Image: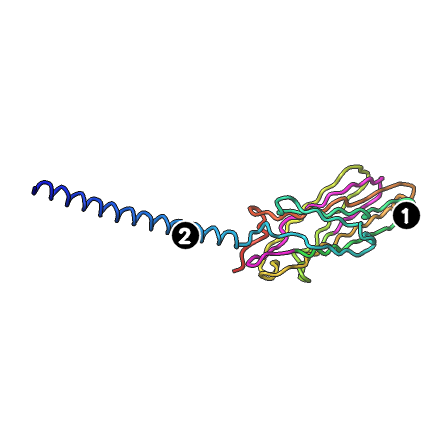
Amino acid sequence: MEKWMMGFALSAFAFSLGGCVAADETAAEESIIEDVGSEAEALVSQPLPSDVFIQSIQASGSGCRTSDSVLPILSDDQQSFIIIFNDMQLVYPPGTQLQSKSCVAVLDMHVPQGFQISLGTVITRGFASLDPGHRARHTSRYFLAGNPLGATFTSVLRGPMEDVYQSTDRILLGSETWSPCGSNVLLGINTSLFLDASSNRRGASLFNTDTTDGVFQKVLHVSWRRCS
């Protein structure tokens, strides 16, 4: 009888202990699920740098007189963009010996709350067919909401040449080159072309800017960051 009672007591104790363990495990699981849910909710509500995108674009100048003369294209990963200039071209003849065109493209960039952006690297591509004695010049300036970014970048080409050309502008990232925290920003790109055919009036030349690629790079040229 005593053995039976002892066995019953031990069984009851084991059952009670198992119940406590099961209850503790259930509470732990619920706590983990709650923590994971909170983290997932935080991740969902947290803005990402990829949320930067072009809302609209305005362009003006002798090289972009029509609405379709400037076309912006944002990459799938939203870390870079391309601006295509359809009318930025100088030709001699029949144009004058000294020619110039310019275009100011202002991009209305959406920036998620808690982030700032700056322009890291800009690559300009075009084509130049220049006879001997002819000279071409491409100039770029950049600004964020009225504040100039870095210096003025200039590339000079001299004839004879007939080839594509490319120039890379790297913006030095200082405290003044970042957009205001948590608000949309106007990113401006001022591009100008100049052709001088006065040294060879019988020659012929063509000079254009096809595209401007703006790159938001996270490693070499950081161009987004959390507000400090």
Q: Position of residue 228 (x, y in %)?
A: 52, 60
- Closer to viewer: mark 1 or mark 2: 2
Q: Which residue is mark 2?
A: 34
Left or right of 75 on screen, residue 163: right
Residue visible at 83% across and 40% down?
130
Left or right of 213 on screen, residue 131: right
Residue visible at 78% across and 52% down?
192
Q: CA distance from mark 1 to mark 2?
A: 72 Å
Q: Earlier in the sequence, mark 1 or mark 2?
A: 2
59 is within the stretch colored magenta: no
Crowd around label 1: few <14 · some 14–19 · many ≥20 (10 Å)? few
Most foreground residue, 107 or 195: 107
Residue visible at 47% across and 50% down?
40
- Residue 207 figure quarter: top right
Q: Position of residue 17 (x, y in %)?
A: 22, 47
Most foreground residue, 165 or 222: 222
Q: Position of residue 116 (x, y in %)?
A: 58, 57
Tag 1 secondary structure: loop
Q: Identify which amino acid the numbered label 2 is placed on.
A: Glu
Per the rendered image, the range of residues in magenta is 110-139
Crowd around label 2: few <14 · some 14–19 · many ≥20 (10 Å)? few
Q: Which residue is mark 1?
A: 95
